[in-house]
Image (cartoon, coloured by chain):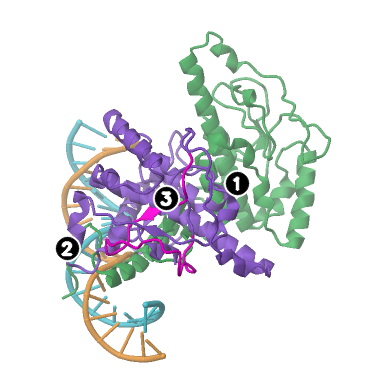
Chain colours: A green, B purple, C orange, D cyan
DNA sequence: TGACCCCATATTTGGATGGT
DNA sequence: ACCATCCAAATATGGGGTCA
């Protein structure tokens, strides 16, 4: 016996259809989970069981917040300003929350560079989540850049070459509902943990991506290319093994910290 | 040989990781497609390839419009008013579009009941799409109802029993940017293709769901229960086989037309 | 690099059965 | 109705190859 081959059409038998639905749904979610962890990609899925009433949609990841985040970054160009790294700081436990809030404030006050102490303070899972938030942010900015690039090229402005000029440091206005202003320097890790000081040369293939904060970034700054400032950052203890692993994959977690995403 | 067992962790080898990603992504999309067609559910998936640059997110279904629709109905309570059946009428070919526009107008002018000619005019795939749109609409209204039910029960109003009173016919204001007003009657198929005339009795387990149009529905009407008007509708030719099939599954397509969704 | 093909095995899953 | 378990067939997919 075993089983017969399966035609790709709606299953006529209600009972087996429901059973199959549950089995396959489970398998599908399992496989999506595998895909994301095996290949380090972010993904989400929404499944409505239209037939059974009184049933919530099945989603993956389980956390609706994550789904929302992914979905938002999917149609990012429309909602750049509404997505913020602050999402990462939501729904923390009280103590961790306090600690992070403090860290965040100090982080903001020090004008956006990612601080060594900040990274050190995170557990691995927090760091992963932080990385995800950065990924989302990077994607949003990147798609925005692409969008504006296309817009620019179709407009065929004769001034397009001037876009590569070094823009004046943007003033991002009030941050975190306080009254300080911040400079435009943005700090990210690079792959070999070395220093690349900002000499304001060869930045033609990099783009300013804005600070990691949920503030509204003036649109025209996205159109301008700017050098990426890279500081020397030591990996936090939770990720040290990525360094010493000897494999060719240490960029896995670091990748979104370096400039390759923006090339 | 063959292959070794696979640990559920990030694949260290970049090459095989990318390869696996492609294979599994394909398999996943395939399986999602199978799930939806086999079990008649609506689902969507978004996969970002964070590592490779210059790459759009992979989505399923292919049509971004459909993804958008599903996603919107996922967080429906926030966007009830922005989702409309009119989505179904977008991106048609010119001729079909004209025809449908006409049909739509006549449909609206006849105050929302689904017209026989309208259903007849659709191809099977169009009909399926139409069904999907209805499903979405139903889901949105249903979740709205659930939300308000909960709201109501938590408020523990002493007037809650009055919610079952028959509400006055709502005036939905201007429709389709024209100046006509419409009655509240909503027409749906029922399972055995028979007539259930509106006698305004035993409607306690049904709820008014609003017309199938992208107009803003006054919120308080959702809180009121109302009878569902059901007219006699013959299945369009494309779906006749569902009737004569003799199986126990003829409700498969009809289900979202009858009132069972609202019980 | 990507697109396909092969193949041996790992994994999924229809269908049946039994329990509640 | 649901759920768990079993089993064998069907499928997915690592790893390797070839071609362009």
Relative to A14, residue D5 above or below: below
Task: State the image coordinates of residue B15 (x, y, percent, origin top left).
Answer: 38, 45
Q: Secondary structure at mark 3?
A: strand
Q: Residue at x 64, y 55 (%)?
A: A126
Relative to A52, residue A248 above or below: above
Task: Identify the residue under disc 1.
Answer: A133
Tell me where the magenta segment starts and ends, as one range: B181-207
Q: Please, which residue is most extreme toward the top here?
A: A158
Q: Secondary structure at mark 2?
A: loop
Visible in this render: residue A126?
yes
Task: Identify the residue under disc 2.
Answer: B245
| Residue B150 lies in quadrant | bottom right
Q: Residue at x 52, y 58 (%)?
A: B143
Task: Identify the residue under disc 3.
Answer: B45
On the same chain: label 2 and label 1?
Answer: no
| Residue at mark 2 to residue at mark 3: CA–CA distance | 33 Å
């Amino acid at each position: 016996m075993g089983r017969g081959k399966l035609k790709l059409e709606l299953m006529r038998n209600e009972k087996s259809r429901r059973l199959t639905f549950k089995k396959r749904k489970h398998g599908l979610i399992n496989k999506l989970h595998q895909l994301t962890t095996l290949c380090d990609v972010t993904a989400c899925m929404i499944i409505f069981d239209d037939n059974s009433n009184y049933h919530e949609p099945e989603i993956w990841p389980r956390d609706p917040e994550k789904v929302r985040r992914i979905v938002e970054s999917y149609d990012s160009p429309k909602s750049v300003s509404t997505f913020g790294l602050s999402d990462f700081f939501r729904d923390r436990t009280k103590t961790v929350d306090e600690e992070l809030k403090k860290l965040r404030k100090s982080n903001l006050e020090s004008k956006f560079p990612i601080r060594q102490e900040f990274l050190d303070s995170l557990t691995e899972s927090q760091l992963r989540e932080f990385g995800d938030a950065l990924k989302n942010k990077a994607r949003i900015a990147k798609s925005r850049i692409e969008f504006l690039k296309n817009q620019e090229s179709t407009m065929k402005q004769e001034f397009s070459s001037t876009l590569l000029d070094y823009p004046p440091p943007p003033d991002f206005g009030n941050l975190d509902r306080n009254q300080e202003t911040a400079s435009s320097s943005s700090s990210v890790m690079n792959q070999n943990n070395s220093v690349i000081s900002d000499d304001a040369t060869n930045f033609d293939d990099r783009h300013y991506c804005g600070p990691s904060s949920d503030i509204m970034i003036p649109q025209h700054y996205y159109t301008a290319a700017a050098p990426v400032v890279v500081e020397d950052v030591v990996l936090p203890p939770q990720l040290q093994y990525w360094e010493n692993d000897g494999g060719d994959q240490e960029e896995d977690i670091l990748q979104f910290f370096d400039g390759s995403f923006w090339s």
